[in-house]
Amino acid sequence: MVRFVGAGPGAADLITVRGLRVIATSPVCLYAGSLVPRELLDDCPPGARLVDTARLTLDEIVAEMAAAHAAGLDVARLHSGDPSVFSAMAEQMRRLDALGVPYEVVPGVPAFAAAAAALKREFTVPGVGQTIVLTRTAARATPMPEGEDLATLGASRATMVLHLAVQRVEAVVEELLPAYGADCPVAVVARASRDDELVLRGTLADIAARVREAGVMRTAVIVVGRVLTASAFPDSHLYSAERCRD
């Protein structure tokens, strides 16, 4: 059995109990060495085969999993954050389906949740923002589908979280300015949950300069939206005294 495990956003202790159990009982572990905390590998069984996939092709990764399955060995396939978002898990599962190799998915803490924790903010604030758009930009990656460009997505002015986009922060600002306005709050969280976590706050008018000054080039998310500074908002209905609790 292959188990895709969300290894969390960076801190080794932000993995689920289930995910840790999978690691501890899998004699083969595939992980992205540049993203997955090395400490997690300490929980692998003695003598486990550890494969850093950072420099492997998709075919090579799938071959490792298929060989382990053929040998009767369980595989822990570690992905940073949560594998449901920007993990390239879908194409691995497609190939495993074709090979008849069974698999499961263990969710993890996504990067945007770790960023919200670092910012000490809720991204769904009553009367301010109730929608979160998780997206990225197309540079150095597969093209974005038609209609998913930032200008189109930004028309709703929903809270936007961008992965894999900090290297193009100037372009992000340019595309979002017409919808959100120069004074819209923005935060960039680099290496969320790690010891070297860095939080930058600003607006669309100045965030690009702050990012360049700090030298942030990767492993960061950009958050855009009024929820980042909202203070005058109504209490939610969830705990309202007027809510019927029968």
Image (cartoon, rainbow, N blue to C red):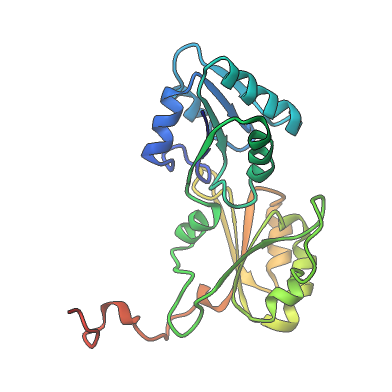
The answer to whether residue 220 is above or below residue 64 is: below
Asked whether, in this view, residue 239 is left or right of residue 204, the answer is: left
Q: Where is residue 151 in the image (x, y as percent from the top left)?
A: 76, 76
The residue shown at (64%, 37%) is: 97
The answer to whether residue 23 is above or below residue 116 is: above
Quadrant housing residue 147: bottom right
Q: In which quarter of the image is the C terminus?
A: bottom left
Q: Nearer the viewer, residue 77 or 219?
A: 77
The residue shown at (48%, 30%) is: 40
Residue that extends furthest to the top in the rendered view of this protein: 47
Q: Which of 55 and 223 is in front in this view?
A: 55
Quadrant housing residue 170: bottom right
- Residue 4, visible in the rendered structure: no
Q: Nearer the viewer, residue 187 or 143?
A: 143
Residue that extends furthest to the left in the rendered view of this protein: 246
Q: Position of residue 236 (x, y in %)?
A: 35, 80
- Residue 54, visible in the rendered structure: yes
Asked whether, in this view, residue 146 is left or right of residue 31, the answer is: right
The residue shown at (72%, 57%) is: 165
Q: Nearer the viewer, residue 161 or 183?
A: 161
Asked whether, in this view, residue 75 is left or right of residue 89, the answer is: left
The residue shown at (68%, 29%) is: 62
